[in-house]
Image: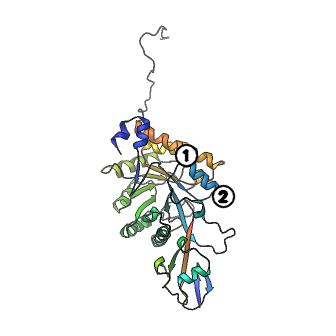
Amino acid sequence: MNILFNGESRAVRDEITIAELLEELTLDPRRVAVEVNLELAPRDRHGETALSEGDRLEVVTLVGGG
Amino acid sequence: MATDAQTGSPETAAAADTFWLGKHVFKNRLIVGTGKYETFDLMREALDVSGTECITVAVRRERLYDGDGKNILDYVDLERYTLLPNTAGCYNAKDAVRTARLGREILRGLDNPGADWVKLEVLGDSKTLLPDPLGTLEATEQLVAEGFQVLCYTNDDPVTAQRLKRAGATAVMPAGSPIGSGQGVLNPNNIRICLEYLKADDPDYPVIIDAGVGTASDITFAMELGVDGILLNTGIAHARDPVKMARAMNAACEAGRLAYLAGRIPKRLYATASSPEDGVISSRPW
C-alpha cells in the first residue's frame, strides 16, 4: 500500500505499524514525533498503531532554530 | 522580584536575582536559539559561553537522506539546558498547535523539562516575519487549554500583549524589531508601555524581548528598560566570531540587569557639577 510520508508517496507493506516503520527507516523513536492524518500518534501506542492506505504521516525531529 | 535584589550590593543582587519563567527558574536571563550556526561544534561552544540555561529548537520533518546524518541532539547537553521548542514557520493557529504538540511529544521522549512549554510563533508575513496577532491569540487559547505554558512571540503592541496575557500566556515576548534584522529595540516606548501594563498587577510577570538583537548594547538597552530576559539567535550565530559575541551578549545582559536594579539617574537638560562649588580658586568669566 502507499502512504504519504512527510509529503512524499512511499510504498510500505500492508498494516505496518508506526513502530515497525520507524525501525525500518532506522529512526530513533525517542527523537521523533509522529502525526497521522493531522493527529498526534503518541509514542506509547506506536507498536499497536497500524497504518492504512493513503494515511498522511508527518515524522518530525528537532533541528536548530530560534 | 526579590527585595534583596533591589537593594543589595551588585554581587548580592546578581546572586539573588533568579529568573522565573512559568514553572522554570534560571539564573541567566538569555534564551539562545540554536539555528544558523556554521557547525554544531560552533553552536555548542557559543551556547556554553553565552551562559544560557535555556535554548530554543525547531520542529521539522525528518530528512531520511540527510547527508551527514548529524542530529542537533548529539551536540546538546540535555542535563544542562532546558529546551524550548518553537512553532517557527507556522502561518496559522492550527499548524502552530500541531507543531507544539509534536515538539512536546519529542521532549517527553527525551525526558527534558521543556516538554511542558512552547515558544509560540504564528507568523503573518514571510518578508517581515512579523506575527499574526489574531492567529497568535487563537493558538494561545488552544494551547493553554491543552496545558502548555505558552511563551508568545508578538509585536510590541501593548494591546495585543495584554490580550495574550489575559488568554493565559505564561510570558509575552515582544519583538524588538523583525527576526534576524539586527535593528535592536526600535520602539522603546511601546516596550515601556507593555511592561507597565503587563506588570501592573503582577510585577513578576515575565516580559521578554524576542528578536531583533544585533549586538551587545541592544541587550543592555532592553534589560535597562526592565524586561526580564532576552531571546536571541542570529545576533550570535551570524556574528563574525559567534563565540566572542556570545560572551559579549552574556556580559551585556548582566550589565543591563544590574543597571536596571540599580536605578539609573534621570536625564537632565543641563549639567550638574560632580565636584563641589565651594572653595573653587578660579573666577568665572561672566
On screen, residue B105 above or below B27: below
**Nearer the observer, B163 or A59:** A59
Count of numbered circles in the view: 2
Label 1, on which residue? Answer: B249
In the rendered image, the residue lying farthest to the front is: B79
**Nearer the observer, B258 or B127:** B258
Label 2, on which residue? Answer: B39
Percent x, y of residue B101 = 46, 71
**Nearer the observer, A46 or B124:** A46
Q: Amino acid at mark 2?
A: Thr
Residue A41 visible here: no
Q: Residue at x 43, y 9 (%)?
A: B279
In the rendered image, the residue lying farthest to the right is: B67
Q: Report the disc number at residue B231.
A: none
Say whether disc 1 or disc 2 marks the residue closer to the N-terminus: 2
On screen, residue A45 above or below B132: below
Q: Amino acid at mark 1?
A: Met
Is mark 1 in CB contact (under 8 Å) with mark 2?
A: no
